[in-house]
Image: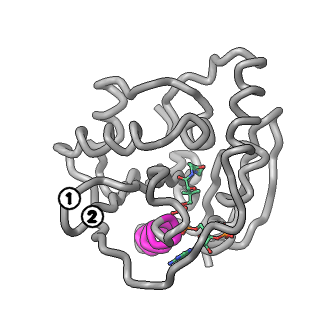
Amino acid sequence: MTINPLSLELGAEHRRDLVQRAADHRRPGTARRRRRLPLRVRQIRPDDGRLVAEIFAGLGLASRFSRYLTGKPRLSAAELRYFTEVDHRDHEALIAVTRNRGEAIGVARYVRDRQHPTHAEVAIEVVDDWQNRGVGSLLAARLSARAKHEGISHITALMTADNVRSRRLLERIGTLTGITRDGAAVTYDAVLT
Ligand SMILES: CC(C)(COP(=O)(O)OP(=O)(O)OC[C@H]1O[C@@H](n2cnc3c(N)ncnc32)[C@H](O)[C@@H]1OP(=O)(O)O)[C@@H](O)C(=O)NCCC(=O)NCCS
């Protein structure tokens, strides 16, 4: 499996519709408060399937499509296992959980490229209710540190072409070196800084 094991077999029309909804969903000018986030970030564990499923459920259709390029309603048991049973070296996943109620609000992961061990694909998702508060940036920074510690210097990220926010997130942890376009999807290459 890859970092995105979900189906890409979506019809072109359905995909275009979801891309448009994702674009509509991104609203500039969201109120910003600078304060310490009431959460903790830790490495994912094999028993975190429920939390990963909750995060997936907390992604609106637009966010889900932005991350997985699918509108699929839930993750299968096999996908949950893949996302939680990681070796923390070639596949690392960090989960953000609220301090007070233990709610899962985001997850970031990398999966190393077997052919190019210094390269990995990354993906980050934050539930809609917690977006624009710095959670994604925090997860990206922690993931970058973990990746560099494991000898990864280059990352790639697959997203929809209009996903400007995610591209900016990527630029906060790396320098973009390449862009490959495939229809509505774009793969960014970056060197971790
Ligand atoms: C992309 C994604 C992970 C970003 O997560 P996020 O938690 O909203 O990210 P942040 O809050 O750190 O950053 C978003 C904005 O808030 C700003 N911000 C950062 N810290 C902040 C804080 N403490 N308070 C308020 N705003 C803050 C950032 O500067 C950023 O602004 P920008 O978009 O103008 O650059 C999230 O939108 C998401 O899950 N999207 C759907 C899935 C997806 O597209 N994943 C990426 C493909 S792999």
Residue at the disc numbered 2 = 98
Q: CA distance from mark 1 to mark 2?
A: 5 Å
Label 2: element kind: strand
Magenta-colored stretch includes residue 7 = no
| Residue at horizontal 36 percent and vertical 30 percent from the top | 79
Q: Is residue 139 visible?
A: yes
Q: Position of residue 55 (x, y in %)?
A: 37, 45
**Residue for badge 1:** 102
- Per the rendered image, the range of residues in magenta is 136-148
Q: Height in image: 168 above or below 180?
A: below
Q: Residue at x 28, y 61 (%)?
A: 97
What kind of residue is marked 1?
Answer: Gly
Question: Quick one: SS at disc 1?
Answer: loop
The x and y percentages for residue 163 are 71, 51
Is residue 151 shown to the viewer in this render? no
Majority secondary structure of the magenta segment? helix
**Which residue is located at x 30 percent, y 53 percent?**
104
| Mark 2 surroundings: few (<14), some (14-19) or many (≥20) residues within 10 A | some
The colour scheme used here is one colour
